[in-house]
Amino acid sequence: MLHASINWHSENPLSESEGIPRTRYIIFLFCFWNFDDVNYAAIKCSKTALVVDPVMVSTSGHTLAGPSILDSFREELLRMADIVTPNLKETSALLGGVPLLTISDMRSAAKAIHDIGPRNVLVKGGDLHASLDAVDVFYDGNDFYEFRSSRIMTPNTHETGCTLATTVAAELAKGSQMLSAVKVAKRYVEAALSYSKNIVIGGGRQGPMDHLLKLKGNVQRRPFDPCDLFLYAVTDSRMNKKWGRSIVDAVKAAIEGGASIIQLREKEVETSDFLEAAKACLKICRVHGVPLLINDRIDVALASDADGVHIGQSDMPAHVARALLGPEKIIGVSCKTPEQAQQAWIDGADYIGSGGVYPTNTKENNKTIGLDGLKTVCLSSKLPVVAIGGIGMSNAQAVMELGVPNLKGVAVVSALFDRECVLTETRKLLEVLKESTKVAN
Ligand SMILES: Cc1ncc(COP(=O)(O)OP(=O)(O)O)c(N)n1
Ligand SMILES: Cc1ncsc1CCOP(=O)(O)O
């Protein structure tokens, strides 16, 4: 059976001219439409889910279905839906014309639509101009979630709603939970919008988005893989100075030793030096296919075109970082609690760093959460986790043997960089990590 995204055009000229009764729906299956890997699975599913995108008013403002269909929509289709994904105008129409001016209005509307019968509601707020970001409100009958993304300025917004609904259907087919499916779909739409923003297709005021971004190879970097977190080397300018080496030499050695991801955590360098170092490190990282992240400094990440950032709880909020960096860059967030981990996930982070697991001298006044604290965060996190804080050769095995599947690796500063030979220390730690995963499996 097929997971279907249904776009209901019952006042489509076809239904009028063919005399199709109101209660028979004209169904457009968009499942094969987006040639992106997120959607391929739509053909493989074994269970059905109904994703309804009520195509009544398009993003461009065109009315696609008039008031005559609303009753049967409310009385029949919505009740069957696993999720319904109206935009603001459709939400208002479904609720008899209520004004929707704020996010609080969107929440009330999501609840009112949920009362009609669908299991989940996603009110899409792309048209809420009171908000700088595009904010969508998701309601599952118990909890509200706000998904924020950057507002991409482009005339090529045609089909965004259909694409989102289709991607949700495809993700459900792959076995995702509803909330995760919505999150992936939003990220995909954002990436496609960003990719298509300057394309000129046809002569109309509004153009379509291009779904083929991945096939066309516009994404130069491979997407983030949680396995990248396995041996996460985090640099420290003080330590490199102490041992008389440059950031670039430190990064080279760590990569040669087997580091799978690098973070430049340079607290004491001038911005211009940081940027130059980031650009030089990026060249090396790209050659070896190792992602390069920048600690805290979103400006440096943007200017150097690094692969992403790592931010803490008192830095730029992750959803703002996501808006600034776009959908493709990697964002890591430091989290000590399940609540912070949940927020990082909602805000669009790709992974969380959790610690200090053990006491450390590298970061002052940093609370130690211990192995128990790490485990609690891992068990609650929907994102992959890397452990940090006081980790080295002697205790990395204990961390990896916690036995929680989303704990993907260790992030290390002093055990690699406060040493004479970064290459040797990285190699040795890699061996310890490999051994401990053998034991754990
Ligand atoms: C992988 C990883 N996890 C946690 C941190 C700590 O980040 P933050 O809380 O922003 O503290 P500072 O590093 O800025 O001191 C990290 N850097 N990397
Ligand atoms: C940056 C950071 N965040 C939590 S602990 C820590 C320091 C980790 O450094 P080390 O690996 O030397 O203990």
Image (spheres, rainbow, N blue to C red):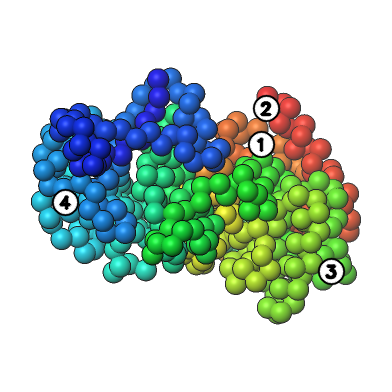
**Mark 3–mark 4 CB contact (< 8 Å):** no
Q: CA distance from mark 2 to mark 3?
A: 37 Å
Q: CA distance from mark 3 to mark 4?
A: 62 Å
Indicate which label's residue lies in the foreground, 3 or 4: 4
Indicate which label's residue lies in the foreground, 2 or 3: 3
Extreme-front residue of the structure = 17
**Mark 4–mark 1 CB contact (< 8 Å):** no
Label 3: which residue? 246
What numbered label is drawn on residue 400? 1
The kind of residue tagged 1 is Met
Indicate which label's residue lies in the foreground, 4 or 1: 4
Q: Quadrant of the C terminus?
A: top right
Residue 119 % position (x, y) = 26, 34
Residue drawn at x 25%, y 37% as measured from the top left: 14
Label 2: which residue? 440
Q: Is residue 62 left or right of residue 192?
A: left
Label 4: which residue? 93
Q: CA distance from mark 4 to mark 2?
A: 55 Å
Does the Cβ of the disc 4 residue fall within 8 Å of ligand 1? no
Of the residues under marks 2 and 3, which one precedes in the sequence? 3
Of the residues under marks 4 and 2, which one precedes in the sequence? 4
Does the Cβ of the disc 1 residue fall within 8 Å of ligand 2? no
**Mark 2–mark 1 CB contact (< 8 Å):** yes
